[in-house]
Image: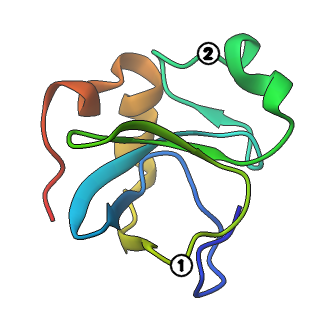
Amino acid sequence: MKYEDGQVARLGDVVSLSRKPGRVVFSIDTNEYGAEFPKADWEYLGKGVMAKFADFGLIYYSESEPDLQLVRRMSESDTDGLRDSCSEERSEPDV
């Protein structure tokens, strides 16, 4: 899945939906999954990403959504940590 600006959505991306922060917790398209969202549980969807928001919960996107915006990309080392502990589940993302 790509954001409206053409960038590919990746695991750990900090995103905004209606000015509410969230984080991409897996991307089927890039084969990236957080520790709490194993590939075996979600690959049946075939494509897209899942984002988790404190205000909205989990939202699945198979195509770009105009209201979903990339705020910032996580570094490779931060993304490795998500795969291990999915620590973003315990705290709000910095926006």
Please tell me whether mark 2 or mark 1 is closer to you in this view: 1
Residue type at tag 1: Pro
Q: Residue at x 45, y 51 (%)?
A: 76
Q: Quadrant of the C terminus?
A: bottom left
The residue carrying mark 1 is 66
What element does badge 2 sit on?
loop
What element does badge 1 sit on?
loop
Using a 10 Å C-alpha cutoff, classify the residue at mark 1 as few (fewer than 14 neighbours), some (14 to 19) or many (20 or more): few
- Residue 7 picture quarter: bottom right
Does residue 24 appear to the left or right of 53 in the view shown? Answer: right
Percent from the top left, x then y, of residue 84? 42, 19
Q: Which tag, 2 or 1, sits closer to the chain's start?
A: 2
Q: 29 and 69: which one is in front? A: 69
Residue type at tag 2: Pro
Q: Quadrant of the N terminus?
A: bottom right
Percent from the top left, x then y, of residue 20? 22, 60
Percent from the top left, x then y, of residue 11? 52, 46
Q: Residue at x 21, y 39 (%)?
A: 54
Above or below: residue 52 compared with residue 67 = above
The residue carrying mark 2 is 38
Above or below: residue 75 compared with residue 33 = below
